[in-house]
Amino acid sequence: MAKSKKSHRPKARLPKGMRDVDAAEVRASSAMLAAIQSVYELYGFEPLETPAFEYTDALGKFLPDEDRPNEGVFSFQDEDEQWLSLRYDLTAPLARYVAENYDALPKPFRRYQTGPVWRNEKPGPGRFRQFTQFDADTVGTASVAADAEICMMAADCMERLGIPRGDYIIRVNNRKVLDGVLERIGMIPADESFDLQRLTVLRAIDKLDRLGPDAVRRLLGEGRKDESGDFTKGAGLSPEQIAPVMEFVATASDEAADVLGSLALLVGDSETGRAGVEELKTMAGLFKAAGYGSDRVMLDPGVVRGLGYYTGPVYEAELTFETTDEDGEMVRFGSVGGGGRYDGLVERFKGIEVPATGFSIGISRLYSALKVLGKVENRTVSAPVVVLVMDQERLPEYQKMVFDLREAGVRSEMYLGTSGMRAQMKYADRRGAPAVVIQGEDERARGEVTIKDLAEGSRLSEEITDNAEWRSGRPAQVSVGEGDLVTAVKDILARHRT
């Protein structure tokens, strides 16, 4: 006798590096996004949406983890055997959009966009392969006033979300200054090996806050082995070359003039470096004129950003307050957003320089921080009133009750299953329904409906110990005429809101 084939049952499991988001977080995140959007709109930015995936060559090779398989992105081929990739940020798709619609767009073009992005990186605690960003970009101007404006807008976003001054800081640097330092230590742009070495230097410095100076020195040199035993190849700089780089990232002060003076000495005669220092000087003047002191926006050479496409000013929004984790250890959230100038992205498509600058907020990390601060807007949405179905033959009548409730603005639903009353009551309880509407044969004969106030009934049931008392008291239950259904339900809901 032939053996019966067992049906395959897929295992219910999340893909590695992904997460599910429950209703409370979805609603709170929506409120957070609305607050950020209000600031972006105030500054004159316009919304835009682009697809989740692009042609792979349009995205370019700018990710900090481009040495990983698929160069840090998730890719597939379409029916024409062309490679497509899920977007790893919202900036590269913007560059494609601007290039494709260049003649029709006002210049500068100012847009904001929010949506999920995907990165094929090693997941870890708090590090996911899919996450949401909220960007704002200005395309078509080389003026660093655009960079300064975005830094000030980032500060305004933090305060609009309820993060008090002193609990955040916008840190600003310039890639040109770092390039000037690299010139001084003998790293001269010549071939592709320079680009890879420069990117490795950027990635090393970008980990300063997380790993500390000693680890960064190793990453600038021969490399570093982490706690898991994985080895990361370094930039291959000599100790003599590493010293000026570490001096550069350590040049920090609340006084912009002190930072600018130290950076001028570090870049020496490098034209690129001097240009970067001048741009920082201009931005510092704009911050001062607009009243954004060093308690909100400050110059910090330790900020370099890990993406390879930045060409000028770079900036990060950092949360500075401390909290405790589950083990009671002190932790800081650190960076919750960042960006910078990327004058070469659109040029890849157009063949002409189209300067641009932008900022991106990491929504998940910012949400976690706001939750710790108690700044999450808990948008309490009452559970729906449930109309029970006592007779499947009378579905249209129950549907009419739900329609009347919804027309009156009452969140409600008809039970759509096929179970009996006990299961329906259990369903309503699990939904957290404030009330259920019941019309069986007896109620229908009288032209009435019965409304059970589940919230009040739960409270009263705790005080009733005798079954006879329960039956005689019929707590939190009322019968009304069919025409009074909406009024009676609204009265119950109003009672619980007060």
Image (spheres, grey):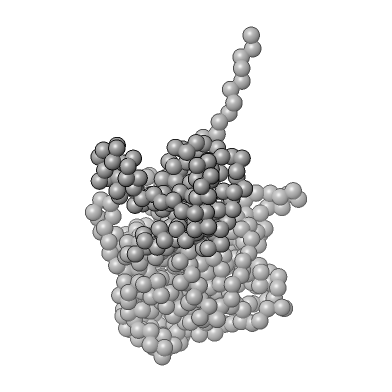
From the top left corner, tell me how far across and down residue 300 is, in percent: 37, 75
From the top left corner, tell me how far across and down residue 320 is, in percent: 32, 69
State which quadrant residue 211 falls in: bottom left
State which quadrant residue 167 falls in: bottom left
Q: Which of 449 and 495 is in front in this view?
A: 449
Q: Nearer the viewer, residue 401 or 116?
A: 401
Residue extending furthest toward the front = 446
Point out the image quarter for the N terminus.
top right
Residue extending furthest toward the right = 80
Any part of residue 275 in sight: no
Position of residue 3 in the picture relative to residue 22 (left or right): right
From the top left corner, tell me how far across and down residue 485 is, in percent: 49, 56
Any part of residue 354 in sight: yes
Q: Which residue is drawn at 29% across and 67% down?
A: 321
Q: In this view, does 278 lie above or below 113?
A: below
Q: Which of 281 and 113 is in front in this view?
A: 113
State which quadrant residue 345 falls in: bottom right
Q: Which residue is drawn at 45% across and 84% down?
A: 283
Q: Nearer the viewer, residue 386 or 254?
A: 386
Q: Which residue is drawn at 59% across and 53% down?
A: 400
From the top left corner, tell me how far across and down residue 472 is, in percent: 32, 42
Q: In this view, does 227 lie above or below 320?
A: above
Position of residue 280 in the picture relative to residue 6 (left or right): left
Point out the image quarter for the C terminus.
bottom left
Label tally: 0
